[in-house]
Amino acid sequence: MPALAREPQPLRLRLAAPAAPSQLRLVRIRMAAWAARAGLDPDTVDDLVLATHEALANVIDHAYPDGNGDALLDADCVDGEVVVVVRDHGRWRRPAPDPGWRGRGLVIINGLAPYVDVRHGDTGTTVEMRWPARPAGRSRVAGTGIRSR
């Protein structure tokens, strides 16, 4: 697999609740700029930005019922992959059997990232997403699955 044009420094952000919802727009802008600096093709940049937004929105909506807690975001280029990790220290809420108009964040994430791993436990939830580090001009890769533990 070809290397990226240039590997940017890792991106690390902490979004503090209750201000997190108002920060999502800025996070999308920063993620897009970071991925573009890495030389990713526009489709992959869009997928990465939307999947990251959905993971952060899940933290805001579900992890902290009282509205107090942080969402942590790490993005890096590792061994030919772009790795984005969103974590919280809140509590896990099982997806509803019938989510109604909402509740499709994990489904969207799974459709956008070729690799998704969701881990939850007493110390919070971690969503790890990976994309091949394809430089601009390379073909897209479809999502392959989601695992939840």
Image (spheres, rainbow, N blue to C red):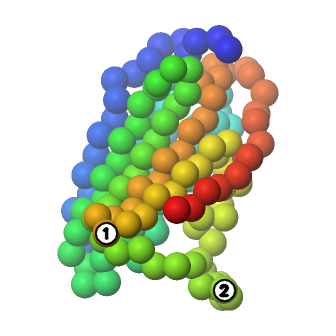
Q: How many marks?
A: 2
Residue at 41%, 37% (x, y): give it: 75
35 vs 2, left or right, is left
User: Is mark 1 in CB contact (under 8 Å) with mark 2?
Assistant: no
139 vs 45, left or right, is right
The residue that mark 1 highlights is 122
Other residues around mark 1 within 10 Å, as few (<14) / some (14–19) / many (≥20): few
Residue at 25%, 84% (x, y): give it: 66
Image quadrant in which the N terminus is located:
top right
Instruction: Answer above or below: position of 145 versus 120.
Output: above
Instruction: Answer above or below: position of 120 versus 146.
Output: below
Residue 70 percent coordinates (x, y)? 25, 62
Other residues around mark 2 within 10 Å, as few (<14) / some (14–19) / many (≥20): few
Does the rendering let one see residue 66? yes
**Along the line of sight, which residue is nearer the eye, 60 or 42?**
60
Residue 65 percent coordinates (x, y)? 31, 83
**Along the line of sight, which residue is nearer the eye, 37 or 13?**
13
Instruction: Answer above or below: position of 34 versus 18.
Output: above
Residue 131 percent coordinates (x, y)? 60, 35
In terms of secondary structure, where does tag 2 sit? Answer: loop
Q: Which mark is residue 97?
A: 2
The amino acid on which the numbered mark 2 sits, given as a three-letter code, is Pro
Does the rendering let one see residue 60? no
In terms of secondary structure, where does tag 1 sit? Answer: loop
Residue at 36%, 41% (x, y): give it: 74
**Along the line of sight, which residue is nearer the eye, 43 or 103?**
103
The amino acid on which the numbered mark 1 sits, given as a three-letter code, is Asp
Residue at 29%, 40% (x, y): give it: 12
110 vs 14, left or right, is right
Instruction: Answer above or below: position of 29 versus 93.
Output: above
